[in-house]
Amino acid sequence: MVWQQVYDPFGSPVLSTIMAAVPVVVMLASLAFFHVKAHLAALMALASALLIAIIAFGMPAGMAGSAALYGAANGLLPIGWIVLNIIFLHRLTTENGSFKVLQDSLARITDDRRLQLLLIAFCFGAFFEGAAGFGTPVAVTGAILIGLGFSPLAASGLALIANTAPVAFGALGTPIITLAKVTGLDEMELSMMVGRQLPFFSVLVPFWLIWAFAGWRKMLEVWPAIMVAGVSFAVPQFIVSNYHGPMLVDVIAALISMACLTGFLKVWKPATIHTSAALSGRVDNSKVDADPDELPASARTFGNDAKPAVMRAWMPWIILTAFVFVWGTASFKSTFDTRAAVDPQTGVALMDPQGKPLRVADPVFAPAITFSGLHQQIEKVPPVVATPKTEEAIYKFTWLTSTGSGILLAAILGGLLMGYSVPQLIKQYLRTIWVVRYSLITIVAMLALGFLTRYSGLDATMGLAFAATGIFYPMFGTLLGWLGVALTGSDTASNVLFGGLQRVTSEQLGLNPVLMAAANSSGGVMGKMVDAQSIVVASTATRWYGHEGEILRYVFFHSIVLAVLVGGLVTLQAYVSPFTSMVPGGH
């Protein structure tokens, strides 16, 4: 029996909207005000969503449970599988010591603080945002900057500002992959749209970073290097996101940006070397500036004998890049996930209407699991859709072609080449599972919440309310993404919470849903620098405990202004030609 979604169960749009928002409020309030651990907050929000969906909105209990299980499955594969295996690789390089060599190789290139910031906070931070995400970039770059003599406030605040433009494609595209799962929109179109928003800010943020650190005049002294870093990141960011997909955007863009900036610094030097590590225009007594002659050895020029060690340190990440690139290609996925369809009677290959060989899901490499109690048993109805539409619920267990599987194989190969034995790899993997156990629980619970919200119609109820903002919604929706990340600490979590709402609202207002779903992620990246999780990571990495409030006050202005600028771009893309032509499929 098909169940039709109900969007106003109380006969009062205001009361129904408040009730639909309860799971989101539980999630955000638990994290922001009561400091509940993320996995517990996600489970609490999921429990409240189940109660409201069943009791208030009349969703059959079996369907509600199936929707949550369907979301949980999508949380484990592909998303949790990516996180588990990238952290495994990161741990291997850390335990091996090659990660420290990799860090030091970047710090030895220049003694100018501004250029060190570009290389470490922006380029190297973007690489680790793309490869690992989840707080890793701020922790790594903050610790390196402290080691180079930057003050704790400078190291913390600037690491947070730098870690913005890459966030939407972080952790090998996890936010975009998740956004596609939650909204039901095409993953490639979402990748393309975000890739037509963030490159503008990939050029702007390096300038903003150096201005925030050294002031306007000092920024202008190194503008050629800043331009090289920004443009060499933005162009690959656009190309990879629009022609390959979301997985390798940051990794490739960051590697190219680091290579271009390093090469540029071999032929260009600033007129003056800026050695002060304090923030311009501020009384910063958090640490005495290090004398240039007393900088750590990692800040001095290295000889040719160190180059083989540097190459070995980069080797696991180069292998990762190659594997993930192959795993992201359509031909690779098609080879294993599908097989030629044949007539069971004659054995003759079947053709599609265009005369091309028809391919169907391979039952070995991509078995399809139908959630029978949910599949085509729920119907969206007007005014959310023009005509009633049933929802599908088929889970494709693509265990081989999942990006996480490519990462695992890359980690195993890299580990063997680094000198690990098979028993040591197994031991490290089991340790990694233990380390990320709460993160996996959080991801599973968040995706279960997102799918339940979508199938129960809770997101549609909230979307109908937000449609009242009318022509101002492109700005409002972008800031909603900022709020989600500011409170949850994760662009992925914000996309889960508000992705479905963005789609429903934009469809109600006649806006392209891909544009506004992407805006949720693009706007969210600017909230990354003010969320509690990131600030705690920054203060911990710089060993500046108890000063989280000072860090927040420093970065808050930058976060708000940059988020409004993203909202302005989204508004132009929604209404003003030629910006509207940037939206996949048109306005």
Image (cartoon, helix red, strand yellow):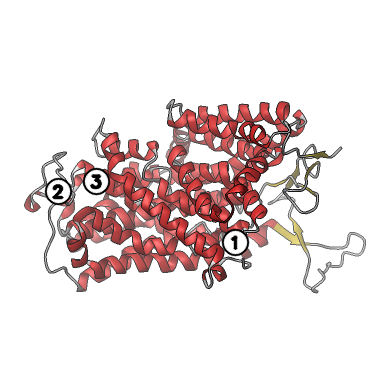
Which of the 4 quarters of the picture holds residue 264? bottom left
Q: Nearer the viewer, residue 565 or 270?
A: 565
Res. 245 in view: no
The disc placed on residue 62 is none
The disc placed on residue 296 is 2
Residue 395 coordinates in the image, percent (x, y): 70, 45
User: Residue at 29% of width from left, 34% of height from top?
Assistant: 549
Disc 2 on helix, strand or loop?
loop
229 left or right of 473 in image: left
Which residue is disc 1 drawn over? 189
Q: CA distance from mark 3 to mark 1?
A: 36 Å
Which label lies toward us, 2 or 1?
1
Mark nearer the N terminus (2 vs 1)? 1
Q: Which kind of residue does numbered mark 1 sit on?
A: Glu
Which label lies toward us, 2 or 3?
3
Q: Nearer the viewer, residue 514 or 445?
A: 514
User: Residue at 56% of width from left, 62% of height from top?
Assistant: 574
For disc 2, the neighbor class at 10 Å (few under 14, some 14 to 19, many from 20) is: some
Q: CA distance from mark 2 to mark 1?
A: 46 Å
The disc placed on residue 155 is 3
Report the quarter where the C terminus lies.
Answer: bottom right
Q: CA distance from mark 2 to mark 3?
A: 16 Å
Look at the picture and state if 340 lies above or below 46: below
- As drawn, the residue found furthest toward the right would be 345
Disc 1 on helix, strand or loop?
helix
User: Residue at 11% of width from left, 42% of height from top?
Assistant: 288
Disc 3 on helix, strand or loop?
helix
Report the quarter where the N terminus lies.
Answer: top right
Mark nearer the N terminus (2 vs 3)? 3
